Image (tube, grey):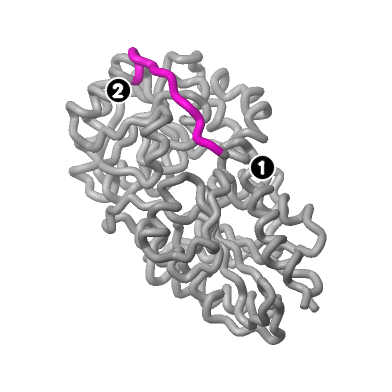
Amino acid sequence: MNTQIKVCLVAGARPNFMKIGPVFSALDEVSGFDPFLIHTGQHYDDDLSRVFFDELRLPRPESHLQVGSGSHAAQTAVIMTKFEEIMQQRQPQVVLVVGDVTSTIACALVACKFRLDEAFYYQGELRDRPVVVHVEAGLRSFDREMPEEINRILTDSISDLLYVTEPSGVEHLTREGVAEDRIRLVGNVMIDTLLSARDRAMQSDVLERLGISERQYCVLTLHRPSNVDDPADLGAMLQQLDALADQRKFVFPVHPRTRAKIDHAGVELRPDRWLMTPPIGYLDFIRLVAGSACVLTDSGGIQEETTVLGVPCVTLRENTERPVTVSMGTNTLAGTDPEQISAAFDQALNGRSEAGVPDLWDGSAAVRIAADMARRLLDGGDQ
């Protein structure tokens, strides 16, 4: 007979924290689940990590693996080695990973091969391997030059339960041969966090602190290797964007990795047209986005946040793994071509159109996940 089902939730990078929080809370409300949080430390900068735990009122991690920086291979190896020790000590029946970062695939890979000391019932059958759960499954950019795309594909292929944010994810997984019973369209846990924090975020005084006014600025974020790693490409991108900064001042919270690349490229941006800041906390960032005239980004999660906030978004990529933000949201794919970026930017500033919020992006995705997991692991698990 199953007793408490231990659920190990893994987070390691900034996007993970917004996704893990609501899932942890929803599982903690279900009698029979014993959730605990592991922080791999993939993002080790306090501005990208600790502040999110404080602002989002996340539970403190039971363990912090303190992985730090390194190449993909080095990070993956350290995460796997340290996470296996956690598995041996805690023996969780469920490992839940989110998103598409290195921590996601590394911990899923460890979990799917791990043998527990004691078997448990899962959907009526005895099992001695943890159930691997992937939240935000099925997203595909179809661009294998993106490390995140490889992480997504591999994590989905070894996960037992796949919780999906939008219909395209169900289509992709079905086409890849995943059994229908393992897939659930539940909505977007990142939007759970956004909706629960929006009122607090709107009380932020970040605009006053930065000396900017509502709708009189645009927000820029850049961090993807394809945009920032090559100094020539990064310089060209910023030069293109600088040509647009005479219409609105650009507020640019700079990821530490991007800052280093800008310095290496020797790029200088005029302070009368650009406001470069260190990384900004979650609540301040949501207020900054909500008050902007437009957001330009290469981030996946920000495409989702702007869709819900109703703010025009220009995505500086040739593809998106979140097509629903284009088909019914505020998002426009502009690629890296100067003319396309300029046209998309002008449209964003001058041609706001009606946008919709995707189905199930209603703040209850985590509750649906917890209910489905309870059905599989608790309601029919005692034999």
In this view, 77 is above or below 11: below
- Do we see residue 275 in this rendering? no
Would you say 202 lies left or right of 290 here?
Answer: right
Quarter of the image with the C terminus is: bottom right
First in sequence, mark 1 or 2: give its number.
Answer: 1
On whether residue 248 falls in the magenta region, the answer is: no
Picture coordinates of residue 232, whole percent (x, y): 18, 43
Q: Amino acid at mark 2?
A: Phe
Name which residue lies at 52% across and 27% down. Answer: 309
The x, y position of residue 382, in whole percent, is: 78, 74
Q: Position of residue 313 (x, y in %)?
A: 39, 29
Foreground: 75 or 159? 159
- Residue depicted at 37% across the width and 36% down the height: 297
Instruction: Please provide the residue range marked out in magenta.
Output: 348-359
Single out the mark in the foreground, 1 or 2.
2
Check disc 1 and give the amino acid type.
Leu
Q: Please tell me how crowded label 1 is: few (under 14), some (14-19), or many (20+) other residues with Cα within 10 Å.
A: some
Q: Identify the residue under disc 2.
A: 345
Asked whether the residues under the numbered discs 1 and 2 touch, taking CB atoms below 8 Å apart as contact, a structural biologist would say no
Q: Using the rendered view, name the quadrant where residue 221 is placed.
A: top left
Tell me which residue sits at (38%, 55%) in the image: 172
Q: Residue 56 has which mark?
A: 1
As rendered, which of 306 and 77 lies closer to the eye?
306
Horizontal side of 164 relative to 377 (left or right) equals left
**Which residue in the rendered view is the most extreme toward the bottom?**
117
Name the foreground residue: 13 vs 372: 372
Q: Work out which quarter of the rendered image holds the N terminus and state it.
A: bottom right
**123 relative position to 250: left or right:** right
